[in-house]
Image: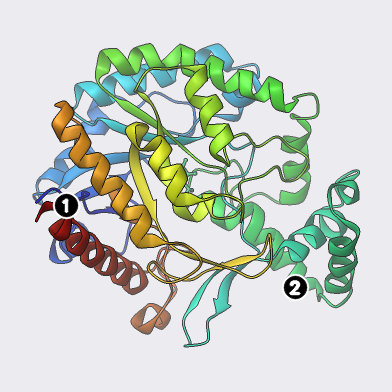
Amino acid sequence: MLKLEKTWRWFGPQDKITLDMLVQMGVEGVVTALHHLPIGVVWTKEEILKLKNQIEAKGLRWSVVESLPVSEDIKTKGKNYAQHIENYKISLKNLGECGVDTVCYNFMPVLDWTRTDLRFKHKGGGEGLYFDYPTFAAFDVFILKRKDADKDFPPEILRQAEEIFKKMPIEEQEKLVYNIIVVTQGFVNGVIDGTVKDPKKLFLEYISHYDNISEAQYRQNLKDFLDAVIPTCEEANVNLCIHPDDPPYPVLGMPRICGCADDLRKLRASNQSVRNGITFCTGSLSGRTDNNLVEIAREFSPWVHFIHLRNTQHLTERSFYESGHLYGSLNMPGIVSEFLKEQRRRQQEGRKDLRMPFRPDHGIRMLTDMDNDIYNAGYPLIGRLRGLAEIDGLQTGIAFSMDK
Ligand code: DNO
């Protein structure tokens, strides 16, 4: 029975969740990266094969690279632009020659994903990630004190932000800075790590690199990046797939250009190779209540090379918490059905890329996840295992009735 490949994000040999554990859990493909290498350098075949052999020795496949990070110099056309593009191309070529064929990246300025609370209490006792828009405004306007930040928020949100800020003890403010600028970024190859003395200052400096980059210019930068690397993907048989912006609209005065159907249309129009693909991240795209995810999945499924599945519960138009995998504001059966249909279409068309790897994205911290602090924020063992099992059950049921 044709089903989406079951994958799991593994943070490499340091990860407390071992490859043996993944085998036990029924994982088929591993999603990982050369996490120990700094952004911008070449991934040599030797390094790639070292990790790949480790994965394959357990009977698993290195299914997706998440991520081959795009440096700030590439995004902003900074001084190392040409060198970093060249290195990116070599890394893609090396990955392809080593048989790793799917590469995820994002094009979010400075920040990757953003949350205001990493331990939001659920009714049942579990904990998960939370994005509260007024708290984020409080961070931007009153804590970071970014110039003109107040102009970016509606008056009612600003009023709430001020209230929140007034009641926020200094330790809470520091925690918010840490949550937004450091901890969610570090393990995903962020530009600022925990060793930096004054993260706010450095962060504002990075933000200032975007002062003169308009949305149109930023789209052009993405197109230039794609036009430079996609020919290498074609030669090396590598599918590149952009991760949507999270949250999917501009934040901190910088452009964000991959957050809705229209953005994805522009992305596809800018370079029409099938290698110019998409990581369909339900959680990220759901950060806008006007995004209809089933429709977006239907429209773009031919170019989706990788799928992140998780649910969110909307609280207001822009605030939400991550509610596990099956239950929440999103129609998960509808979304999964679209990809199972796409798999069958690909089979009929004779396409080779039938795996369509999905991973349970994030998870609720629950049960023995609570016993210690050994997992990356958003990536607990039990919460994700529950998501893997739920989605696999869902897809098995749907695939069974489709093929009957
Ligand atoms: C968050 C992840 C992202 C993703 C990158 C891809 O949990 O989905 O950090 O890995 O944006 O480059």
Look at discs 1 and 2 and give the one toward the viewer.
Answer: 1
Measured along the vertical axis of the image, is residue 41 above or below residue 322?
above
> In the drawing, what numbered circle is on residue 171?
2
Give the quarter of the image for residue 14.
bottom left
- Residue at figure coordinates x 88%, y 61% from the top left: 158
Left or right: 170, with 343 as reference point: right
Horizontally, is 263 left or right of 153 in the view?
left
Instruction: Check mark 2 vs ligand 1: CB closer than 8 Å? yes or no.
Output: no
* Disc 2 residue crowd, few under 14, some 14–19, many 20+, Cα 10 Å: few
**Tag 2: residue type?**
Glu
- Residue farthest to the bottom? 124
Residue name at image x 41 percent, y 44 percent: 297
Q: Can residue 233 be seen by looking at this rendering?
A: yes
Residue 309: name its quadrant. bottom left
Q: Which residue is mark 1?
A: 28
Label 1's element?
Answer: loop
